[in-house]
Each structure stands twice: as C-alpha cells, then as structure tokens.
Image (spheres, rainbow, N blue to C red):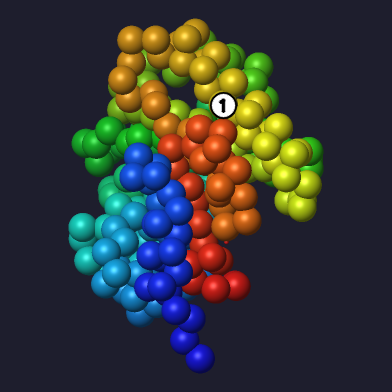
C-alpha cells in the first residue's frame, strides 16, 4: 500500500507559515519514494547519515537542497562536503574544524547550525549554552574562513507533555536571541532556529521556529 505522500505534504504545508522552511526528512526512504515528494514540489530534504545522503544526492535531481540533521562523525564529513546545503547538527569544535577543512578542499562555504541540548534525556546530542559560547569565542572558530553559522537547532524531549516541549523550545529561542546579541549582532546569516518534528512542529512554530524537520508525517512510519 502506498502512503499518500503528496497529500501529507500539502496538508503540512497548509499548516506552516510561508516563512517557515519545511525540511522533509527522508532517512531510510528510497530515491523512488523521495521522488514522490519531489514531484509534489518539495526541494529540501534531510538525512541523518552521510553514507545514505551521498547515493541519494547522486541518484536524484540536482536542484534538491540536502540538509544533514543527524549526529555527524568527523570522518564522514568528506562524503557530503561537496554538495550539502546545511548541516543542522554541529555539536563540537572538532566537528566544525573538520567541516571547515573539507569546505576549503571543495572551495565552498558550508552553512551550519549549532545543535543545542535542550531535552531532558541525556542521550540527545548537543552543546550546552556554555559550550556553545566557548566554541564561538574560541580562536579556532574565529579563524574558520569557510563556515557560515546560520543559527541553532534543538530537539525536544520525546514526551506527550506539550508544556514541557513548549518550555524546551522556548529555552532554545531564548538562547538563540542571547547568542545573536553576543556574537552575531551585525550578521544577517545568523537567523535560523531549527526546531519541530512530526509530533511537535506546531509547538515549534508557536515558539518561533524558522525550519521544521518532518519525516514520518510525510513519508509514514519508519
Ligand atoms: C528523524 C529525525 C527527524 C524527523 O523525525 P519525525 O518524527 O519522523 O518527523 C527530525 N530531526 C532529526 C534530527 C531526526 O533524526
């Protein structure tokens, strides 16, 4: 049985404001399935594994914008550096250093979001507020010529408690404004807050999300 991908997409698009970017999370989905969403007009797709993104990039139309949303290991950056549009999941200076090196090799600027740990679970990746400030204040970061920091990303706790999710997203929004003021006041690129997935994107949007990362509500359960 096929999942009504195009209907799902249209329904989600009708619920998000035009200024919020929809990143269709296509991890584990085949190029054929991704093409269904492409035919409906979707051009921004997100993957959580570099080794999965590369063959899809190669197989699919070149006007697709590919976003990396999952935890990225430094030794995998080389697979996606030639074409990736945005890396949402930067959670260490070491990773950012590698992304900068690969960006130089490919003669590109690579846009990145810093992932902030906002969830209660200790299993989710991300920087604390202090770690984020340390990274941005570091000499190594200031010397990275091929990185554009476009904003922050966060994942809320997996819970039915809407209030808690709301609190966590609000925390991310406050951190965003604080970091913007401290490090990016005259920088127009630092403007994205990537928050909200299939089960909580409406809460994310209420709290000021500019990008939602939606997988199962489009493609069905994995
Ligand atoms: C899988 C994934 C998503 C999408 O999750 P859904 O609940 O299927 O919408 C969003 N963000 C990240 C980082 C993911 O790994």
> Where does label 1 land, which residue?
173
Residue nearest the viewer, comparing 222 with 59 = 222
Q: Look at 66% across and 17% down and name the residue there.
A: 130
Q: Residue furthest front?
A: 14
Q: Look at 41% across and 73% down and name the residue there.
A: 7
Q: Is 194 rendered above or below residue 44?
A: above
Query: Quadrant location of the C terminus?
Result: bottom right
Any part of residue 102 in sight:
no
Q: Is residue 213 left or right of residue 222?
A: left
Q: Look at 47% across and 86% down and name the residue there.
A: 2
Any part of residue 109 in sight:
yes
Across and down, in percent, residue 31 comes to 36, 74
Residue nearest the viewer, comparing 110 with 5 = 5
- So how many labels did they put on this image? 1
Q: Is 122 rendered above or below residue 127?
A: below
Q: Which quarter of the figure has residue 53? A: bottom left
Q: Is residue 141 left or right of residue 116?
A: left
Q: Is 154 rendered above or below residue 133?
A: below
Q: Is residue 180 left or right of residue 40?
A: right
Q: Residue furthest bottom?
A: 1
Label 1 within 8 A of ligand 1 by Cβ: no
Q: Look at 65% across and 26% down and name the residue there.
A: 171
Q: Secondary structure at mark 1?
A: helix
Neighbours of disc 1 within 10 Å: few (<14), some (14-19), many (20+): many
Across and down, in percent, residue 99 comes to 41, 36
Across and down, in percent, residue 173 comes to 56, 26
């Amino acid at each position: 049985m096929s999942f009504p991908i195009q209907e799902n997409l249209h329904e989600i698009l009708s619920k998000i404001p035009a200024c919020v970017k929809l990143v269709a999370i296509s991890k584990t989905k085949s190029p054929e399935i991704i093409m269904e969403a492409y035919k409906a007009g979707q051009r921004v797709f997100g993957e959580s594994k570099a080794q999965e993104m590369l063959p899809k990039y190669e197989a699919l139309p070149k006007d697709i914008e590919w976003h990396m949303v999952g935890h990225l290991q430094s030794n995998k950056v080389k697979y996606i550096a030639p074409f990736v549009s945005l890396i949402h999941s930067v959670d260490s200076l070491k990773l950012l250093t590698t992304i900068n090196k690969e960006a130089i090799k490919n003669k590109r600027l690579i846009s990145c979001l810093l992932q902030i740990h906002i969830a209660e679970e200790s299993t989710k990746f991300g920087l604390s507020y202090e770690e984020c400030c340390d990274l941005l204040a570091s000499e190594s970061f200031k010397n990275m010529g091929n990185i554009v920091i476009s904003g922050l990303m966060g994942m809320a706790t997996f819970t039915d408690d809407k209030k808690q999710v709301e609190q966590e997203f609000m925390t991310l929004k406050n951190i965003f404004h604080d970091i913007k003021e401290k490090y990016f006041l005259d920088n127009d690129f630092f403007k994205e807050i990537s928050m909200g997935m299939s089960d909580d994107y409406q809460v994310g949007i209420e709290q000021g999300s500019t990008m939602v990362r939606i997988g199962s509500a489009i493609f069905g359960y994995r």
